[in-house]
Amino acid sequence: MAEKRQIYKLISMSIWIFFKLLGSLALLMFGMKTMSEALQKMAGPQLRHVLGAMTTNRFTGMLTGMLVTASVQSSTATTVMTVSFVNAGLLTLAQAISVIMGANIGTTLTAWIMSAGMSFDITAAVYPAFFVGIILIYQKRYRYIGDFLFGLSFLLLGLGTLRATGTEMNLGENQALLDFFASFDRTSFVTTLVFLLLGGILTFCVQSSAAVMAITMILCSSGALPIYQGIALVMGENIGTTVTSNLAALSANTQARRAALAHMFFNVFGVIWILFVFRPFIDMVCGWVGYDVTMTKEANGAAAFLANSAKLTFVLAAFHTSFNVANTFILIWFIPQIERFVCWVIKPKRVDEEEDFRLHFITAGFMKTPELSVLEAQKEIQSFSERMQRMFGMVIELLNLSSSATAKEAKAQAGDFNKLYTRIEKYEGISDNMELEIAKYLDSVSDAHLSDDTKAKIRAMLREISELESIGDACYNMARTINRKYNGKQDHFTERQYDHIHQMMGLTDQSLTEMNRLLGGRKESYDINRSFNIENEINNYRNQLKAQNIADINNHEYTYAVGTIYMDLINECEKLGDYVVNVVEARMGVR
């Protein structure tokens, strides 16, 4: 009976330790996420401007990527920003690759934070930080600092609990675990490859290189895992995290997939060359930290061995940093060649993007940080707006095709007319889909904790896409009116009517051009009066043509039916101008 109780006690303790380990890893991952998002809320827009301004050459690009990643504690966030700038044409792919190289160096700061958390008992310090954090969260002005403190505290609490759990598990004395690692030949190259593969698979499965790094640090610092196998796991983590980003980028556009492939190439190349100098490189790093590679428990005693093993957390962090710095130093000279390689591997899709409904900047699974996802949505709205102006250009072309002078010409152009009308119909469907997809994306982004500034931007963008869809409807209404006249038995417009319609459409096209200039640039440098002046011109011209139309019908210049179709086009242009002004006001923050 006593033996059964002992067995039950051992089982319950094992289950408790197992869940404690999982819970501490969850705390660690949640803390990292919260801390990173809080930092981005505090500095997101400024960091985007820094990225755009400080990437004049490969070296400033690398330094920018390093500083931005160290600031926001997220290489994913830096990569997202970088890709969005490439999509927008603000950065070349070569500049983006240099930023990604810097991001790999910046992200190593996380390993140093973790090594400090594993080496010292800092759990007592987190409780005052929680208290200060909750006070700051309830103060609107400092709530992001409070979020950051909460994230950092969760991170340190997770590390402290992980460290305590590792000590409680007594991994260095667990004979089964020691026998498992001893079954691998430490001097074998195959063993290194096995642990490298294991590190990649673990990182891919848990979707967090930080969590796998924490497990590696526990195993190494407890004396259970030899340093060479531990380093192999870290190298595998570097590859595993790029596999995740490449899979996420599969549904992305060409430039995003190229950037993700460049990231993978960087890490895979680094792992390949480090394998040739594996042991000398690790011995050099161990010498910097002061870790004795030759020390064994049998020869030096358990206390000295564990004290030496405790330094392994810093060895892992030092290796992670030196590996990425050395790899960047080697590859930064070959950025043009890397660019050519990824462009050769990933070729642009051979589709007519004008006729293909596909969001070019918003990608499922690739954008992970809400604050930065707003930039992607803005670029998508800019693309939406440009598409609507192209649609209006088709309407003008359709009008020109409908104004054939003779029946023979009209018959010859009938095929072109119908083809263009069908294309406009397709664009109207695309505009409906774009509004729904962008709105759905913005809705998912708004579920996260956002800054007030970002919430206001999302509200403005929802208004913008609604008005842009209305522009598409107005274009389609004009196309239907032209089609009804073309296929009906009404007389042609008079030459003066055509002149008036073209003049009105010219003013409307000017307003669309101004709108696109605003959406493609910075609102601080835009003069909103330009759009208002064009809108006033459109309104005044509509009123003038309305009065003149009544007089012309009374004077029998043309039939009432022709006059009605004529004014339908004029009024639709005026409505379209109103929608344009609404978009401009939404972007400028005018209510």
Image (cartoon, rainbow, N blue to C red):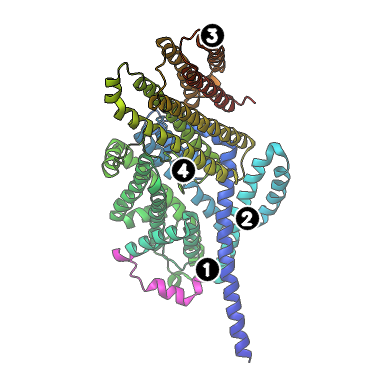
Q: Quadrant of the N terminus?
A: bottom right
Q: Which mark is residue 194?
A: none
Q: Amino acid at mark 1?
A: Ala
Where does label 2 land, which residue? 122
Q: Amino acid at mark 4?
A: Gly
Please tell me whether residue 489 is drawn above or below residue 59 in the rendered image. above
Measured Cα–Cα span from mark 1 to mark 2: 22 Å
Q: Earlier in the sequence, mark 1 or mark 3?
A: 1
Q: Earlier in the sequence, mark 1 or mark 4?
A: 4
Q: Residues within 10 Å of mark 1 (few under 14, many from 20)?
A: few
Which one is in front in this view, the residue at disc 1 or the one at disc 4?
4
Give x and y (percent) for residue 517. 47, 22
Measured Cα–Cα span from mark 4 to mark 3: 73 Å
Magenta segment main secondary structure:
helix
| Residue displayed at 58% across by 84% down | 7
Where does label 4 land, which residue? 106
Disc 1 secondary structure class: helix
Q: Earlier in the sequence, mark 2 or mark 3?
A: 2
Which one is in front in this view, the residue at disc 1 or the one at disc 2?
2
Where does label 3 land, which residue? 551
Magenta-span inclusion, residue 400: no
What range is drawn magenta here? Answer: 170-191
Q: Quadrant of the C terminus?
A: top right
Measured Cα–Cα span from mark 2 to mark 3: 87 Å
Q: Are marks 1 and 2 in contact (CB under 8 Å)?
A: no
Please tell me whether residue 40 is drawn above or below residue 481 in the rendered image. below
Q: Are marks 2 and 3 in contact (CB under 8 Å)?
A: no
Measured Cα–Cα span from mark 1 to mark 3: 105 Å
Give x and y (percent) for residue 76. 47, 45
Where does label 1 land, which residue? 303
Q: Amino acid at mark 2?
A: Ile
